[in-house]
Image (cartoon, grey):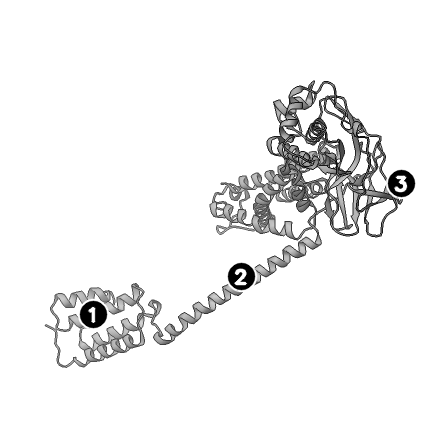
Amino acid sequence: MKFGLAHRVMTNALAALGALALLSAGGLKPWVSALVLAQLLRVATRRAAAHDTQVIVLALAHFVLGSVLGTGPGYLACVTGALVVTPGALVLSHLRREVEGNYTQGARDRTGLPVDVPRILRSRRVIGRAFLASTFVWAAPFFVVLFAVLPRMSLSLFPGIPMDFASRVDLGAPGEVATDPALVMRITADRGPMPLYLRGKTFNAYDGRAWHADDAPLVVRTPGTKDRKITIELEPLAPSAIFVPEGASAIVERGPTRYDAYVGEAGVEAIDRARYLALPGDLTPRVRALAHAWADAEPTPAGKARAIAERLARDFSYDLRSPSWGKEQPIDDFLFVSRRGHCEFFATALALLLREVGVPSRVATGYLGGAYNRFGDFYAVRRSDAHAWALVYVDGRWQVFDGTPRATRTSIITREFLEGYGAASQRRVLGATWRVATIGVGLWGLVYAYAWWRRRPSEARERALRPGVASPLCRAIDEALARLGIARDPSTTPARHAEELARRGHPLAGEIGALTRVYLEVRFGGRVLTPREQRDFARRLVRLSAKTGSSAAP
């Protein structure tokens, strides 16, 4: 590939990935669109390596801003691609900057002519498979460093923008669940992890298409000494709502948007059972039959709730754009036609099926999970964490049952790991990496020491004469031949001279040929002579030289 073409491809790819990452995290907000447009203009008007540096810096800035807004699957895919492209883009930008810098400084090539920058950019000798492979390999340590060392951010850039929290759950109107990464609340727990389910509203009455808010008040008591305190600081909401962990029994206000929720051992609560067993009159017979088919085998209310929740989680699929939304009978369509929906469908189906088999239930909406922020030591809950689940009256208490597929619910763990990777996690990862590296270096040192120990005695015993110093053998043979009166002409090789002596029938040709073969094996065959073999070679030369007076040429 041409040097200039490879440079453009990699920098353009990095710019595109940065823009896509920002768009996937922030959507089509005006300021996001302005940043993406600025990148496009810089790419379109660049003329030199300095401009490419600006493109790369803008792309990296887009990734940083995207990480602040939220890291969804699209953002993570763009980051992965950028980690592969970035090393090559940086190396090629540096090379091009050096080439252009030498040109401006009047550098000349070996022929004395000025450096031909266009010719270098057209060259195919710089970029090859080895270069591309090595830059792609560099992406692995880049990924490790970025993931293990740099902190994760879970902050909202615009905390003052009001956000709505629905006062009803409507399955009869077409729509789509919001995936906005904007911050909703900050949570601080005095001990242990934060609770997963944060309830904002409960819904009791279902008319066949929508749930309406429950008027049941929160039972508030005086906090106990053993209760766990969870401090919640809300962002502006419209309409306002109070979010409490499931099981909260006391709330103490600390300000307009700040309060403490206390979670302790819940007491028995008496309810109006008829209120939470009411079903819409148009509920289809096959929905009623399905409830009995799934739950009648279980003798207890908790068993019935688990059985129905497990069937929903196992046999149905999660889909933000549910095809059942807006249907005349949305739950019937969800259970028997599309079999795909989001959390509101799963919560509604679970509550209605339980009511059909005589178990009081209702729907709750709020937020599920949150990402830990190391800078403020709090959990950040985003709007994209919105969730719906069922509250089931079991043994005198409202308990959480969730029929949403587990793969979807447990994806919060992945999000917390990617976004909420804090100082403690970094210390654990870096500590484990250091231990593994130390063990690896120690093992490598032991292997190297053993290999050296194995080689050292052999070399000490043999003191081998390597092929690179075989010339003393040749000189010793030539000196003996000169004393014999059959010196080798410098233009004749030792092998050719030995063959000529044998052809002429010289009486010492056999010994001369044998000694010459030893030299050739050392010089060209890689043979190593032991000290004993060297002494034997020297004695044979001495005996050969002693035949000077008794041997004559034929």
Viewer-nearest of discs 1 and 2: 2
Q: Is residue 148 above or below residue 337?
A: below
Residue identifier under label 3:
256
Q: What element carries label 3?
A: loop
Q: Where is residue 258 in the image (x, y as percent from the top left)?
A: 86, 43
Residue identifier under label 1:
514
For the residues labelled 3 and 1, the Cα–Cα distance comes to 104 Å
Q: Is residue 513 above or below residue 333?
A: below
Question: Which is nearer the N-term, disc 2 or disc 3?
Answer: 3
Q: Is residue 62 above or below residue 105?
A: above
Residue placed most toward the observer, 309 or 322: 309
Q: Position of residue 284 (x, y in %)?
A: 68, 19
> Can residue 542 be seen in this snapshot?
yes
457 vs 22, left or right, is left
For the residues labelled 2 and 3, the Cα–Cα distance comes to 56 Å
Which amino acid, by three-letter code, is at mark 3? Answer: Pro
Residue placed most toward the observer, 542 or 411: 411
Q: Do the residues labelled 3 and 1 touch (CB within 8 Å)?
A: no
471 vs 396, left or right, is left
Question: Which is nearer the N-term, disc 3 or disc 1?
Answer: 3
Which amino acid, by three-letter code, is at mark 1? Answer: Ala
Quadrant into which the C terminus falls: bottom left
320 vs 448, left or right, is right
Label 1 environment density (alpha carbons within 10 Å; few <14, some 14–19, many ≥20):
few
Residue identifier under label 2:
440
202 vs 407, left or right, is right
* x 86%, y 47%: residue: 223
Which amino acid, by three-letter code, is at mark 2? Answer: Gly
